[in-house]
Amino acid sequence: MQLDHKLQPADCIFVMGSNDVRVAEHAVSLYNQGLANKILFSGGFGRLTEGVFEQSEAELFARIALDLGVPSDAIIIENQSSNSGENVKFSFALCQQQNLDFRRFILVQKPYMERRAYATFVKQWPNPIDYVAVSSTKQSFSDYFSEEVDLFAVLEAMIGDFERIKDYPAKGFQIEQPIPDQVEQAYQAIKARI
């Protein structure tokens, strides 16, 4: 589910909503490397943050970026979206309102959401795109676990994302992604056991 894109300079680091603050920290790291001079944080409250976060995903992530030294004029906040499609749709509308014509993007998301973030963005961003890559922290599988999040919660989230990769192209939400036979077989084996 990871794409391992090689990153090039972009107009915008586009951070799609998440419940994992490491996503925001990774975006700041890319900003500090000079890969873009704007960070767009997108996300209101989603199914994993509703009732958990006290402020929207975008506002929390922007606060983290500010605390890590990103200047406020480099940050754009879209705080109404509740899913990946809305991240793209609402962020595009916000860019239009602010007369921002970004064409080169680095998308930032959790590792297991790289492929879906990419497929959704490419399908739903209305304007021409000159470059898009996706990036994430490269944590190990066990790094997802905590006192609040156990193995089954992580597997459920990953399986849900994989199912969206399979199902959403037919619904017009994202572009088709190749699914190797061994990946489908692994999915079926895991699904049968949880």
Image: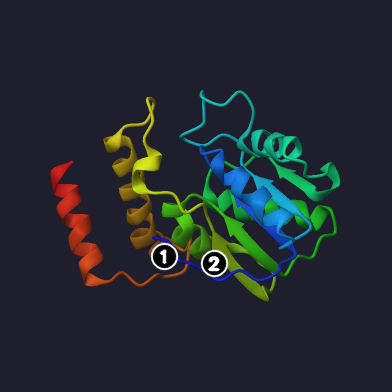
Write down the quadrant of residue 149 in the picture.
top left
- Residues at discs 2 and 1 in contact (Cβ within 8 Å): yes
Which corner quadrant holds the C terminus? top left
State the residue at coordinates (63%, 32%). Answer: 56
In the rendered structure, which amino acid carries the disc numbered 1?
Pro
What is the secondary structure assignment of the residue under circle 2? helix
**Residue beneath disc 1:** 169
Find residue 129 and report its horizontal and vertical position in percent. Answer: 67, 73
On screen, residue 125 versus residue 179, left or right, reads: right
Res. 136 mark: none
Q: Is residue 23 visible?
A: yes
On screen, residue 68 versus residue 74, left or right, reads: left
State the residue at coordinates (14%, 48%). Answer: 192
**Residue beneath disc 2:** 123
Q: Residues within 10 Å of mark 1 (few under 14, many from 20)?
A: some
In the rendered structure, which amino acid carries the disc numbered 2?
Lys
Which corner quadrant holds the N terminus? bottom left
Find residue 113 and report its horizontal and vertical position in percent. Answer: 45, 53
State the residue at coordinates (68%, 74%). Answer: 128
Name the image colouring. rainbow
Find residue 80 and report its horizontal and vertical position in percent. Answer: 65, 39
Find residue 193 and report its horizontal and vertical position in percent. Answer: 14, 44
Decide: is 17 above or below 33.
above
Q: Which of 98 and 172 is in front in this view?
A: 98
Q: Nearer the viewer, residue 141 or 121?
A: 141
Write down the quadrant of residue 32 in the picture.
bottom right
| Marked residue nearer the N-terminal end (2 or 1) | 2
